[in-house]
Image (spheres, helix red, strand yellow):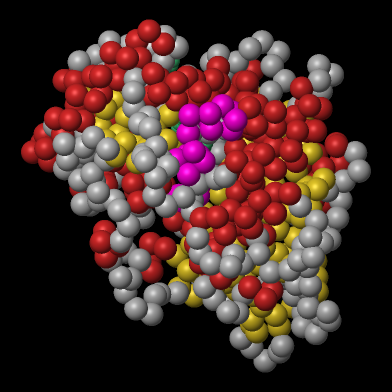
Amino acid sequence: MSDAPTAIRPIVQPVTDRILKSDGEAGAASFVIFGASGDLTARKLLPALYDLWQDGYLSDASPIIGVARRDKTDAEFREEMHVAVNEEARTAPIAPGDWDRFAARLFYRRLDIATPEQYPAWGESIKAIEREAGVTDRRIAYLAVGPSLFHDCVEALAGGGLIPEDDQDDHPPWLRVVVEKPFGTDLESAKELNHDLRVKLRETQLYRIDHYLGKETVQNVLMFRFGNGIFEPLFNRQHVDHVQITVSESQGIEGGRGGYYDTAGALRDVLQNHVLQLLALVAMEPPAKFAADDIRDEKRKVMEALRPGGEKLDDWAIAGQYVAANGKKGYLEEDRIKEGSTTEAFAALKCRVDNWRWSGVPFYLRTGKRLPEKLTEIAVQFKLPPMQLFRTVECSGDVCDLIGAQPNRLVFRVQPNEGIELSFSSKRPGMQYQIHPVRMDFDYSEAFPTKLPEAYERLLLDVMRGDRTLFTRDDELEAAWRFLDPILKAWAKPEHKPQEYPAGTWGPDAAEQLMSDSGRQWRGE
Ligand SMILES: NC(=O)C1=CN([C@@H]2O[C@H](COP(=O)(O)OP(=O)(O)OC[C@H]3O[C@@H](n4cnc5c(N)ncnc54)[C@H](OP(=O)(O)O)[C@@H]3O)[C@@H](O)[C@H]2O)C=CC1
Ligand SMILES: O=C1O[C@H](COP(=O)(O)O)[C@@H](O)[C@H](O)[C@H]1O
């Protein structure tokens, strides 16, 4: 019998998103993008803004002003962005007329963010563009620069007169500042950054971005758990054997990112943010209402309940570094990696969420570069039934085994093949009671034949709408750093060496052992 999944289709067609346009306050605002000559602006931000404009979410009156250190005219900036947006276009190439209409709102204003003398004149040039566009009191600043410049960007906004005074009723001005990741490098630096940003800004003006929260399938975790009555009662220690979360990448350290990555490593680059956010969504309690602070309160509680999954650090935290294999070079041979670097390109943790719901349930987390495939998923594995009433016979050659029920598994496929699958046991057709594992599969592309919005598109729209639900808050981030700080300190010691794994494999043997010690197994291995 085939274990081909049973497709799930929506019962009614989805209400178009356009209905949301009347909701909230997504009117015209000016965008000031720091880091406008960088990779993030070209590959993610401008394509997302273009798509939002095409879909009717971005007002024609909104100017987009790129800011960076190098010299560039508006025309050059427009042309560079044209190339970038075309490269990222997910459907047909952009029609020239469309691009010209969009590009008319693109401007470039040079600034060395570390040079305060330049702030006043630069600020005036930004205000002049905004006046011309008729958008003077609604501003979104996007800090798409390295984290060491976040604070200076806010200083530049203030020095350029772009952070207006509170009004007479003490209401802050309409200013939203989007801060990229990584948000600090450890607990202390994250606290310092939070403090520094709040000297000039209110917490309500800050949007700390983690683009995983903008992925459609990540948002679906909460919808699935709290929008259905039948699954949530199973999400606890009575029914769940363990949870495993994988964010794997097949790529190495590319695009000149070696300089940054080598100072960060897998723990800071992906585990502290994307992986722990996924964990928080799958483990959190239902919020009292679906609103930003209620959700972030619950996520913070999960972060605060994180505990090591073993006595000694090596029993629950594994660092790995790939070596040349399968036609790929090793980490140490990548561009801009310092000689003999001990930075981890792979991290796996076994941890616990020490609360009433999850006590005793291990959470296994792993992320890394140069693994066999690009894949992000959360797998919730349930306990076996208390008795094995059914079995089947599986033969390989002359050797036959009696096999019992396989554990039920619920998998959130974040990417690729976005969807949710549930595996369960079924009777194999025939004259005997033979058990066979099968799957029910909800596949986004089949159920909703429409393109999924890109994460940055959704998140930028939320900034315009003033919805901070999908943005992280200072206390949850600090709690995440607090949990990871002991690992960061131990791994920074000169005697610490990550364990080697061949490029293109699932990480070092020790990561497998994290699971196999308790008779469990990573999916896909
Ligand atoms: N790229 C990505 O996919 C992702 C990036 N991020 C985060 O986004 C941020 C930007 O990353 P990315 O675009 O890759 O970085 P890049 O190195 O490609 O770009 C850095 C930008 O910062 C500008 N810059 C640097 N110093 C100054 C200065 N003194 N004054 C003015 N501008 C300056 C550069 O301008 P110039 O070249 O003119 O000097 C450039 O535009 C980082 O925090 C990164 O961690 C987060 C997730 C994904
Ligand atoms: O933030 C980051 O995420 C990407 C992975 O994002 P994805 O959306 O492609 O899954 C990762 O490659 C990068 O190192 C990290 O900084």
Residue 408 x %, y %: 68, 71
Determine whether, in the image, residue 427 is placed left or right of residue 471.
right
Q: Give the magenta part as a residue range.
A: 193-215
| Residue found farthest to the right | 311
Residue 448 sits above or below residue 80 on the image = below
| Residue found farthest to the front | 168
Residue 204 on the magenta span = yes
Residue 449 sits above or below residue 273 on the image = below
Is residue 353 visible in the rendered image? The answer is: yes
| Residue found farthest to the bottom | 431
Residue 26 sits above or below residue 358 on the image = above
Instruction: Identify which residue is drawn at 19% across, 24% down.
Output: 128
- In which quarter of the view is residue 422 placed? bottom right
Residue 174 sits above or below residue 8 on the image = above
- In which quarter of the view is residue 265 placed? top right
Residue 475 x %, y %: 64, 44
Residue 392 x %, y %: 74, 78
Residue 348 on the magenta span = no
Residue 122 x %, y %: 29, 16
Is residue 247 visible in the rendered image? The answer is: no
Instruction: Identify which residue is drawn at 86% across, 51% down.
Output: 517
Q: Nearer the viewer, residue 45 or 105?
A: 105
Q: Nearer the viewer, residue 509 or 359?
A: 359
Secondary structure character of the magenta stretch overall: helix
Q: State the quadrant of the N terminus.
A: bottom right
- In which quarter of the view is residue 115 placed? top left
Instruction: Identify which residue is drawn at 81% across, 27% down.
Output: 490
